[in-house]
Amino acid sequence: MSRGGYSYERMFAFSSSRPPVPTDLVAKIRPATLARSRTLNLRGTWSEVIPGGVLRRGSTVLVEAESAHGGVSVALSLAAQASAEGLWAGVVGIRDPGVAAMVDLGLDLRRVLFVPSPQAAWAQAAADLLEGVDILVLQPPAQIKSALARRLSDRARERGVVVIVVAKDSSWPVPVEMNVRVTSSRWDAGSRLVSRVLRIRVSTRDRATSSFHDVILPDPRGRVATH
């Protein structure tokens, strides 16, 4: 499959088995990740929804949503903010990320590494990508051991990588810096244009209160907008 002359098969780094990330690729990515600020700036709708309009490097963000309620779209939309700035992103465990949808969300697919089906090796694949990316979207299996989740979070903090975990029913077993929960989801259709309205609750570890927001994701252009 290709779009604009670019072959998307090349983006899928692994299939069922997990070879190591090539050292030349790590070396190519790492110089960009070393010249880092302490935050990743958000723009547009997310700059209004996320406290401070930034994602803190080394933090873990939990996106909670029931299946097909927009959790993956929220996570990828947040990741697009980093990818669009010329940084590197990784996506682990999302079997069908939807190439056209990701382009619409703003992801620069030339700087995204995918591990769509890591199976039992998902944690090792995530750990490998933490060595070279700035932001990692992770959809782990349903059952996760606390010790494993804690090691990944600690490693992300050491490397200054923002980890966005897509899960449901609070299945991520360790505390996170930010929680974005999709509380409701509905599709609206007008003429031939279809959009999805999400009600989300945003809470952070350092704030005692939560905030609620209505966002459209995707809007008729395939992106995120306020409702």
Image (cartoon, rainbow, N blue to C red):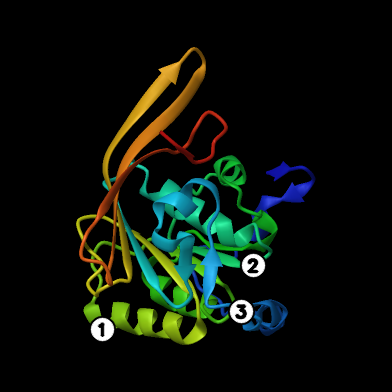
Residue furthest to the right: 5
The x, y position of residue 96, in whole percent, is 48, 48
Name the secondary structure under disc 1: helix
The x, y position of residue 133, in whole percent, is 58, 73
Q: Which mark is residue 87?
A: 2
Is residue 21 depicted above or below 194 in this figure?
below
Q: Nearer the viewer, residue 14 or 42?
A: 42
Q: How many marks?
A: 3
| Quadrant position of the C terminus in the picture | top left
Instruction: State the residue position of label 1.
Output: 147
Say what amino acid the circle numbered 2 marks: Leu
Q: Tell me which corner region of the image, top left, top right, bottom left or bottom right, holds residue 165.
A: bottom left
Q: Residue at x 28, y 72 (%)?
A: 206
| Label 2 packing within 10 angstroms: few (<14), some (14-19), many (20+) | many
Compare marks 1 and 3 and give the one earlier in the sequence. 3
Instruction: State the residue position of label 3.
Output: 36
| Quadrant position of the N terminus in the picture | top right
Say what amino acid the circle numbered 3 marks: Arg
The x, y position of residue 62, in whole percent, is 33, 62
How far apart in space, not on screen, are marks 1 and 3 (Cα)?
28 Å
* Residue 16 visible to the viewer: no
Q: Is residue 98 left or right of residue 181?
A: right
Between disc 1 and disc 3, the foreground one is: 3
Name the secondary structure under disc 2: loop
| Label 1 packing within 10 angstroms: few (<14), some (14-19), many (20+) | few
Compare marks 2 and 3 and give the one earlier in the sequence. 3
How far apart in space, not on screen, are marks 1 and 2 (Cα)?
29 Å
Q: Nearer the viewer, residue 94 or 84?
A: 84
Q: Nearer the viewer, residue 19 or 138?
A: 138
Q: Residue at x 61, y 48 (%)?
A: 106
